[in-house]
């Protein structure tokens, strides 16, 4: 089987043997980690406008109701994050808001911007000036759009979700696997440390999940830029009543991810949606972002776990809970992955810079 990646002409090929091996993975094939990492962040939903209308997503607001954070609001969130020791400013917004969102474009114009991407650049510049490292997740990106902000981010990300064509992505504004895979490829070409993942339970089959993981692995083999893969269950909310995957189903997907992916790519489940304790033996070694300040704007009904509770749990299991930065240590150590703008913040003699270097060296 082969999947075409956007208009690049690149094809990702899978062998039936690869698929069979991953599907047949057993618990004994997985080695449990002795270290669980996380990043302390603030969640900044730059705009709730989105070109897509995925049936499981509560993040986007319809035209007339979508919001755009002002520079003053962003700065307030950043300063609060710094006060609580956060190292990551997680910028999110819906994929390319189109001309349905006239009010959003008018607000951007009033702020001196012709697109959400140049506004994101200004907000990333603000973050670095304040001393917190941006990690942007702006959905599908063209090469030009990603170049606009790449040098101002410690890392970036987009969820692949699935390589399958599912009804949950249907409608006049369809999200396609080719677009998502194309974004992953562009990030690799630009040498951006990158986060991606799959969404479990939106109508895909077990084989689809394996093919999605293999697609991520194949693109990483080309560029080496994937730092973590999220295995996220879909959950019931005001727009989705299709149910959530059973625990054993999720455990199986996490095992498949750990077995399929290179050992230097971390595997995580969102700790506010899934019980961390129930996935440790499946191979997770990262928890992603945990915020002491902001809610999870993607899944607002699910609260972040308290770090103190996580520390007690991991200590009982003989596992070390370790804070990290939005850029993984190996990318910092290898060189060539960190822009001068980001490096300047980390290497500064400020208290923040000293803290970042301490985390990187621990």
Image (spheres, rainbow, N blue to C red):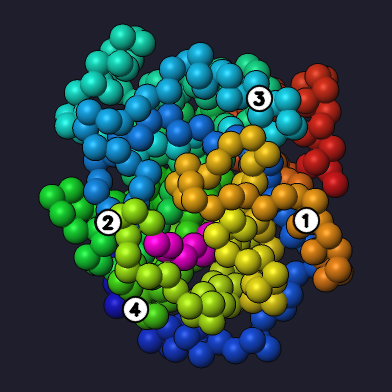
Helix, strand or loop for disc 1: helix
Helix, strand or loop for disc 2: loop
Look at mark 4 in the image and give the residue it sits on: 205
CB under 8 Å between discs 1 and 2: no
Q: Is residue 232 magenta?
A: yes
Helix, strand or loop for disc 4: loop
Q: Residues within 10 Å of mark 3 (few under 14, many from 20)?
A: some
Quick check: can you spot residue 296? yes
* Residue 348 picture location, percent across and down: 77, 21
* Residue 53 picture location, percent across and down: 24, 48
The span from disc 1 to disc 2 (Cα, nearest Å) is 34 Å
Does label 4 or label 1 sit earlier along the sequence?
A: 4
Look at mark 1 in the image and give the residue it sits on: 309
Left or right of 102? Residue 130 is right
The span from disc 1 to disc 3 (Cα, nearest Å) is 22 Å
Highlighted range, magenta: 229-236
CB under 8 Å between discs 1 and 3: no
* Residue 19 picture location, percent across and down: 43, 83
Does label 1 or label 2 sit earlier along the sequence?
A: 2
CB under 8 Å between discs 4 and 1: no
Q: Is residue 317 magenta?
A: no
């Amino acid at each position: 089987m082969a999947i075409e990646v956007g208009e690049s002409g690149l094809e990702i090929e899978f062998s039936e043997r690869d698929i069979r091996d991953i599907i047949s993975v057993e618990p004994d094939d997985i080695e449990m980690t002795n270290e669980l990492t996380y990043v302390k962040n603030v969640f900044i939903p730059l705009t709730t406008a989105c070109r897509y209308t995925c049936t499981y997503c509560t993040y986007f607001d319809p035209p007339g109701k979508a919001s755009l954070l002002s520079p003053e609001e962003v700065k307030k969130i950043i300063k609060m994050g710094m006060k609580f020791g956060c190292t990551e400013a997680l910028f999110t917004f819906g994929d390319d808001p189109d001309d349905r969102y006239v009010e959003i474009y008018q607000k951007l114009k009033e702020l001196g911007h012709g697109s959400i991407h140049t506004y994101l650049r200004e907000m990333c510049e603000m973050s670095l000036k304040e001393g917190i490292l941006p990690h942007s997740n702006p959905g599908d990106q063209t090469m030009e759009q990603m170049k606009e902000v790449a040098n101002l981010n410690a890392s970036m990300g987009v969820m692949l979700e699935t390589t399958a064509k599912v009804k949950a992505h249907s409608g006049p504004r369809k999200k396609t696997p080719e677009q998502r895979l194309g974004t992953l490829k562009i990030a690799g070409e630009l040498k951006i440390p990158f986060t991606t993942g799959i969404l479990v339970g939106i109508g895909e089959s077990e084989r689809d999940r394996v093919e999605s993981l293999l697609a991520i692995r194949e693109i990483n083999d080309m560029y080496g830029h994937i730092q973590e893969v999220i295995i996220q269950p879909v959950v019931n909310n005001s727009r989705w009543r299709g149910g959530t995957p059973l625990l054993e189903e999720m455990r199986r997907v996490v095992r498949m991810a750990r077995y399929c992916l290179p050992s230097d790519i971390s595997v995580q489940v969102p700790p506010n949606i899934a019980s961390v304790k129930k996935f440790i033996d499946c191979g997770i070694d990262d928890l992603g972002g945990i915020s002491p300040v902001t809610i999870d704007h993607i899944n607002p009904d699910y609260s972040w776990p308290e770090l103190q509770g996580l520390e007690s749990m991991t200590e009982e299991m003989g596992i070390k809970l370790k804070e990290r930065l939005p850029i993984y240590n190996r990318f910092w150590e290898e060189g060539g992955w960190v822009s001068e703008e980001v490096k300047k913040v980390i290497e500064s003699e400020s208290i923040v810079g000293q803290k970042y270097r301490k985390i990187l060296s621990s």
